[in-house]
Image (cartoon, rainbow, N blue to C red):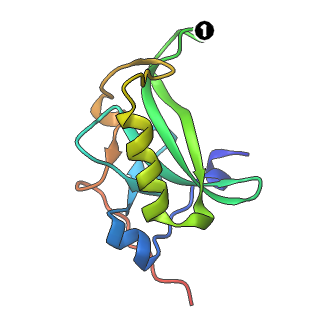
Amino acid sequence: MSAPDLYVADVSPEEAAAGFAVCRLGSAGGQAAAVYAWGDPSHRLVKTRGRDGIIFQLQAFGRHPRVGGLADWYAERHWPGGYGPAWALARLREHLGRRGYRPLIELQVPAEDRAVSIVAAPVVVAPAH
């Protein structure tokens, strides 16, 4: 699935209430996506399309130990979107809050051009009818 087909740039009222916002992803050529971000710049939760519909994908920024090269955003985990954003956020907090949690990659803080532009460049999307 290509990046234009992967990211979903609409936010439901339930997702907006949970803290999701439509943002520009610097790592995806400035493509818009529904994103949940918090005080951790090396992680984000992005609304994407999976084989079976919408999923919430936890992405981590850093260097992949086997790929090497430049740091980038990598999918770390995902949860089905059908259960709703509150359920996905609860699973996210459980996952990141586990005592034995270790990211799959060597985490780094993304440079400004690779970060999520939430405040600087929000995208206004008309609600679907």
Where in the figure is residue 50, as x and y percent of width and height? 70, 52
Name the residue rendered at 52%, 67% in the picture. Answer: 84
The picture quadrant where one finds residue 100 is top left
Quarter occupied by the C terminus: bottom right
Q: Closer to the camera, 69 or 105?
A: 105
Where in the figure is residue 79, as x and y percent of width and height? 58, 50
Task: Relative to 126, say whether 99 is above or below.
Answer: above
**Residue lying furthest bottom:** 129
Where in the figure is residue 124, as x and y percent of width and height? 37, 72
The picture quadrant where one finds residue 22 is bottom left
Name the residue rendered at 34%, 31% in the picture. Answer: 42
**Label 1: which secondary element:** loop
Task: Relative to 127, say whether 43 is above or below.
Answer: above
Count every numbered label the image shows and give the total: 1
Crowd tier of the residue under label 1, counting other residues whose Cα lies within 10 Å: few below 14, some 14–19, many 20 or above:
few
Task: Relative to 9, say whether 25 is above or below.
Answer: above
Q: Amino acid at mark 1?
A: Arg
Q: Closer to the camera, 100 or 96?
A: 100
- On the rendered structure, is 119 left or right of 79? left
Name the residue rendered at 39%, 31% in the picture. Answer: 98
**Residue lying furthest front:** 99
- On the rendered structure, is 50 left or right of 123? right
Where in the figure is residue 46, as x and y percent of width and height? 48, 50
Name the residue rendered at 27%, 47% in the picture. Answer: 38
Quarter occupied by the N terminus: top right
Q: Closer to the camera, 107 or 67?
A: 107
What residue sits right under mark 1 in the picture? Answer: 66
